[in-house]
Amino acid sequence: MKNKPKISVIIPVYNTEKYLRTCLDSLIIQDCKDVEFILINDGSTDDSFNICREYQYRDARFIAVSKENGGPSSARNLGLSMAKGEYIAFVDSDDFVEPATYSKLCKLAEKECADIYVFGASLLPESSPKWLWDLVTTRDVVYTSFQPEIIFEEPGARPFLWLQMIKKNIITENNLKFDESMKLGEDQLFQTCCFPFAKKIVFTSEKFYNYRVFRENSLMSKFSSDINKKVEVHIDLIDKMFNVVFSKFDDENLRTVLFNWSIFLIWPDIIQLLAENQTNSALKLIKVWKKYNCEKLCDRLDIWGQSRCNQILLMGECGLNFDKKIDKYKKEIDRLENEICQLEKQPKLKKIIKKNKRKQNSLFGKFFKSLRKYGIKKTLKLVFLKITKKF
C-alpha cells in the first residue's frame, strides 16, 4: 500500500466482540488496496482489542490502537489525527460493508472529483421502520454547490456519518472535530460543520453499507427507551448546531432551514411527555431560540413549522393547563367573532363605539380598536401573538 492511501476508514470499537468479526471480515475481503482501516479500541472490556490485533497481523491495511474509554467522538478524533488518506470514511464496529465498496468509491472519486460522497444502506432486520429505510435510501444526484436543503432534506445526508466519504482537506483546513461532550447526535453536528464547506456533493443510490438497527446496550437503544432523556439531548444538539451555523455561516436560508429542522426534530417526542416535563422542555427549547434571535426567522418557516412553533411556544407559556387554555382562547376568539358580526349588522355602529368609550382601555376596547384599524384577520393574529408572548 502507498504511504498515502486514497481512503482512510475509521472504525471505533467498544465491546462489540459479538459482531466485530463480521465487520472486519467485510473489510478484509475488500479488493481495494489503496485503503487503510484504522481500528480504535475505545477501552473495551471484552475481547474486542485482541480481535482487532488479529486482523492487523493478517492484513497490512489494518492499524489497531487502544485508548482509554472516551466515547465514539473521542475515538473518531484519534482516528482523524492518524488518517493519511485523501478521503475519510467511517464504519461502526457492529455493522459491515458490501464487497468492493471502496474500489467503487475510488472509481467514483476519480470520475466526479467531489468533496463529499453519500451512499445508501440496507437495514438489519429488514422489518425496520419505513421512516428509517427512507433515511438510508439515497438517490443519484450531483450538487455543484452547497444548498442548505441538502443537509436537512436529502436522504443520506443525515444523521448517519457512515453513509459519507469526505475529503480530508475539508476537515483539516477548517479544523473540524467531533464534540466529545455529546452523548448523542455528534454525527449530525459534524455533518452540519462539513457540508457547507463542500463545493461539490455526489449522491449515489448504491447501497454500500449494512446497518444493524437494534443492538443491546447501544447508546441509541438506551436513549430511545427514555423519552425525557432523548428530548434533553436533542435540545443540547439543537443548541450546538445553532452555535455552529450562526457563528460560522452568514446564511439566512441555512439558519431558517435549521430552525425549521429543530422543530421537526423535537416535536414527535415532546408531545409524548407528561405535562410538567413538556413545559420544562418547551421552555428550554424556547431559551435556545431566544439566544439565537430566531424570532426574525418565524415568518420564513413553512406552514408546518409555523404551526408547531406556535404550539411549542404555547406549551412553555401555558404550563400544565396547556390544553384547557388553548380551548379557552379558541372559545374567546369565537365569542368575539360572533359579537363583532352582530355589531356590524347594526346601522348605528358609531353610537355603539361612542357609548363604549369608557371601555376603550379594557381588553375588549383594545380589541375593538384594533379591529377598526387592521381588520379581523390581523387582529386575531395580534391576539394570538399576545397570548403566546412570542419569544
Image (tube, rainbow, N blue to C red):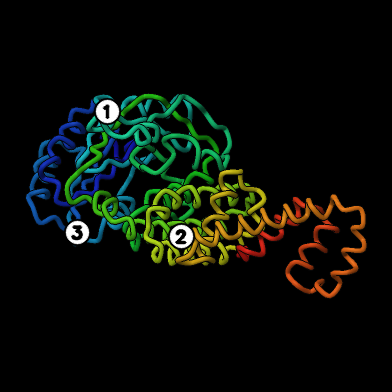
Would residue 86 appear left or right of 34 to someone viewing this image? Answer: right
Label 3 packing within 10 angstroms: few (<14), some (14-19), many (20+)? few
Q: Amino acid at mark 3?
A: Lys
Residue positioned 43% across, 59% down in the render = 235
Secondary structure under badge 1? loop
**Numbered tag placed on residue 67 in the rendering:** 3
- Image position of 217 with respect to 32: above or below: below
Determine whether the residue tagged by mark 3 lies in a helix, strand or loop: strand
Q: Are marks 1 and 3 in contact (CB under 8 Å)?
A: no
Q: Which of pointers 3 and 2 lies earlier in the amino acid sequence? A: 3
Residue wearing tag 1: 32
Estimate the spatial distance between the alpha carbons at disc 1 and disc 3, rounded to whole Å: 28 Å
Q: Quadrant of residue 134?
A: top left
Q: Is residue 159 visible?
A: yes
The residue at the point 91 percent across, 53 percent down is 347
Q: Position of residue 15 (x, y in %)?
A: 14, 51
For badge 2, the amino acid type reads Lys
The disc label shown at residue 240, or none = 2
Indicate which disc, 1 or 3, sits on the residue closer to the N terminus.
1
| Residue 136 shown left or right of residue 169 in the figure | left
Quadrant occupied by the N terminus: top left
